[in-house]
Image (tube, rainbow, N blue to C red):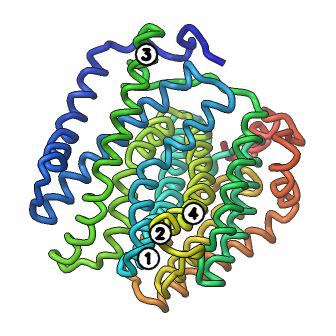
Amino acid sequence: MILDAPRPETQAVSPRVLVRSLLIAAVFIVPALVMRVAGAHPDAVLALLGYGAAVVAASFLLAWAAEAVQIDVSGGLAIAVLALIAVLPEYAVDFYYAWTAGHDPAYVQYAAANMTGSNRLLMGLGWPVVVLISIAVANKLGGRKVTALVLEPGNRVELGFLLIAGVVAFAAPATGHIHLVFGLALLAWFGFYLFKLTRGEVEEPELIGTAAAIGALSSTRRRATVVALFVIAAAVILACAEPFANSLIDAGTELGIDRFLLVQWLAPMASEAPEFIIAIIFAARGKGTAAIATLISSKVNQWTLLIGSLPIAYMAGGGGTSLALDARQTEELLLTAAQTLMGVAVLLALRFDRWAAWTLLGLFAIQFPLTGTHARLGLTAVYAVIAVIALIVNRKHLPGVLTAPFHGTEATEHPEAAIHDARGKGSR
């Protein structure tokens, strides 16, 4: 359905905010496009900085347009567009590595690196930071101690989809392959996820900053601006994906840094930055539940759509029907799957406790100094043990979460009643 006027929640913001934001983005995008069009081959580190800055700037363009498009597009179309936009930067880099691995075995080791990095970054850094900020804001504004963030009953749907996908995902490290059939199954599961979301009610958007400036434009100018931002951002990301991906590897060689680590962490940090910033802003404004719900939905997208697409890109690049994982990628994927299972297990009761946030953040941080096979397997075991304990403690909530994807978003209690009960226990 197309709506003709801005929603009431879209606050009027001066057009100068939009102009200023676009000029700042252009400062970082133009040099990369000039290098790309001119066929220049600068130093690997300079290329990494130049193309990386362009990807970050383009990601912000996508974020602003994706927020503003909710005014004009509702229902399933908005959900589908937003879901695809959210993972476009990761897609660009991941697709390049997986596609290249299809005809160049040297790139096989990088095929799944960006995917595991983006997933662990989202759950290990994004989730806990948003929750801790939300709890801090609640403690500052409220008159009593807050120790947890309470999710909405409708979030059982996302948790259910993520839990089932998380358990199934262990098949990849167990077999050492991401098979085409497995990928298609994950894509089908993501398609079912979109279908279920279209059955729910569409919420009115609340825009901030540059997105609000776009939303304040007239209908014609707003829609033209959104389309232009989508096209420009997509073109920039597609143009910069290959040189950015190659510069990650070349810069690692030049600087003596593990190339796998650069591919795994630097690219996701660039593409996830806008989403993290928006979520943190909402958390700082006391809208932590909405912020964490958005990041949970992003995790569902990455753990289904992103993984499921890798074997397709690999086959398109000349590879077979199964993307083989080397020993390190198997360990990384196993570690990521264990983290995913823990993250869902601690949320089965629709409470994100402060201890869970600190635990996710701490375990994410210690993986960097603790490297090597034994460290990764040990950390995997820690995640798994916590997940099992959380599943046992929250076992009465497990059936409701598992069946939520198939039975809808109906809750056993009214949302306000759940929040009231949680606040009575010193949470929010």
Verify CB contact (< 8 Å) between mark 1 and mark 2: yes
Q: SS class of the residue under badge 3? A: helix
Looking at the rendered image, the quarter that the N terminus falls into is top right
Q: Which residue is mark 4?
A: 307
- Three-letter residue code for mark 3: Arg
Instruction: Using the image, tell me which numbered label, if any, was put on residue 367.
Output: 1
Earlier along the polypeptide chain: callout 3 or callout 2? Answer: 3
Q: In this orientation, does residue 162 appear?
A: yes
Nearer-the-camera pick, 353 or 78: 78
The image shows residue 119 at horizontal and vertical percentages of 52, 62
- Give the Cα separation between the discs numbered 1 and 2: 6 Å
**Left or right side of 63 for 58:** left
Q: SS class of the residue under badge 1? A: loop
- Three-letter residue code for mark 1: Gln
Earlier along the polypeptide chain: callout 2 or callout 4? Answer: 4
Q: SS class of the residue under badge 4? A: helix
